[in-house]
Image: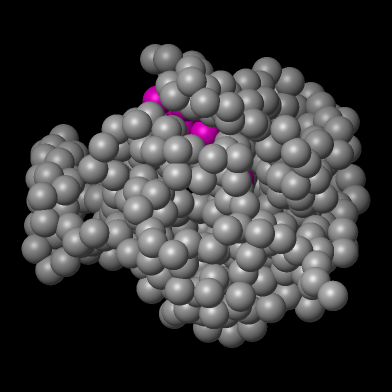
Amino acid sequence: MSRPGRLIIADPGLTGPLGHHLGYSVAVAGAALRAGMPTVVLAGRRFSGSFPVLGAEMHPMLGTTYQTAGGGGLGRRLIFGMAAHLPAPLAGLVAPPLRRMRRMLRAAAAPADGLGPELARALGRIEADSMDLLLLHSVSGANLASLAQAANFPNVTLLIVLRRMPAEMEADDPASEPMAALLHRLVARFGPRLRLFADTEQLAAQFVAFSGLPVRPVPLPIIVPSVPDRPPAALSHVVFAGGARLEKGYQHLPAAVAAVTGRARFTIQSGPVGPQDDPLVQRAHRALLARRGADLAVIEEALAPDAYAALLAEADLLLLPYDGRVYGSRSSGILAEALALGVPAVVPSSCWMAEVAAPDRAVAIAPGMLPWEALTAALDSLAELRRAARAGAPAWRAKHNPDALFLALVTQP
């Protein structure tokens, strides 16, 4: 008697019990098990702790890196650390050429990506076969290229979720060929056993136009606690949560906090910031630490899932001064969670974030507008924004949840 087909979730970026990699894998694993499909998780070798989904089989056996962008050695730490003490205009000039040089060096000297051969061995150990589905929800161009070349790859069906824009994938950890050519090579290798997805409608359309291949949009696997409605406090609680990076607008936070002093209290959750981070980010972090007090809390560590969810649920407004040109058609997990909770936000214009949230549940940072100007406008209309966000939350949760995602992944086109 043959065994039932399994969902095998392979995530080389899943290296610890925190963050969005864990959240995505946990959400999909739970949905698969609820649907009666046995689930196996292949995580990074450095994963510690237990996988928090009862019934999922866990194997921390992947050594390949998902993303190397943003890393760096002693030279980067020394240069960025010194530049962080320069005046802001000069500090901002240091990082871009260093990143370009690092990308060129990485492209010239990086070893071949090992995810494909590693996955072939791992799948062989768990005796994967044509009954099984292999989900890759976070992969780089280099990862995909190694899949296309891997020998002795089991006859599984591949479910690949593209979550970054083509230009990003060709800049950070790229394949040695253009993304469109790589996707066609994957189709040639795996044929009908390959299904391509993207986690926003806009990103799916971008990949279709870019490659000419079918790419289906799928929902986001959002899980949030039930939050009772409550009146805002005397000081509105504004939250920034996520990585301390330029693309997330971390450098704008000190000015935003100063601009609304007396009108709001802030919680900034960024994780640790060190000499390897962009000089402007380091400068902003020092300025925030200097202002810490009753109206500004700075959390310098990653939060466990329950603590992170509680922080978002306690917010009256999310401040997300991201670079809209960088984010473009890709999703934001934090905004998606805020919309599910009924929390309004300040977001960049001309990107997916503004399209799904503004104008009724968010204030968009229009071209030429400073982030704190949008924050002031959001605080001025916070009551209306909160009502719209609460009213829209049930429909958002009905569309974006793990069970809807699992159904979309396993449904034949």
Looking at the image, residue 280 sits to the left or right of residue 160; the answer is: left
Question: In the orientation shown, which residue stands out farthest toward the front?
Answer: 1
* Residue 178 on the magenta span: no
Number of numbered discs overlaid on the protein picture: 0
In which quadrant of the rendered image does the N terminus lie?
bottom right
Describe residue 187's horizontal placement relative to residue 250 as left or right: right
Which residue is at the front of the view, 233 or 384? Answer: 384
**The C terminus lies in quadrant:** top right
Span of residues in magenta: 324-333
Residue 249 shows in this picture: no
Q: Residue at x 21, y 50 (%)?
A: 279
Question: Horizontal and vertical percent for residue 220?
Answer: 69, 43
x, y percentage for residue 148? Answer: 39, 49
Does the magenta segment cover residue 328? yes
Give the quadrant of residue 249.
top left
> What is the quadrant of residue 357 in the picture?
top right
> Furthest-top residue in view?
367
Q: Residue at x 60, y 40 (%)?
A: 192
The front one of 87 and 331 is 331
Above/below status of 184 relative to 120: above
Q: Nearer the viewer, residue 208 or 319?
A: 208
**Observer able to see residue 61:** yes
| Residue extending farthest bottom | 49
Q: Residue at x 79, y 78 (%)?
A: 54
At x 60%, y 77%, the residue is 126
Asked if residue 274 lies left or right of residue 209, the reply is: left
x, y percent for residue 36: 87, 64
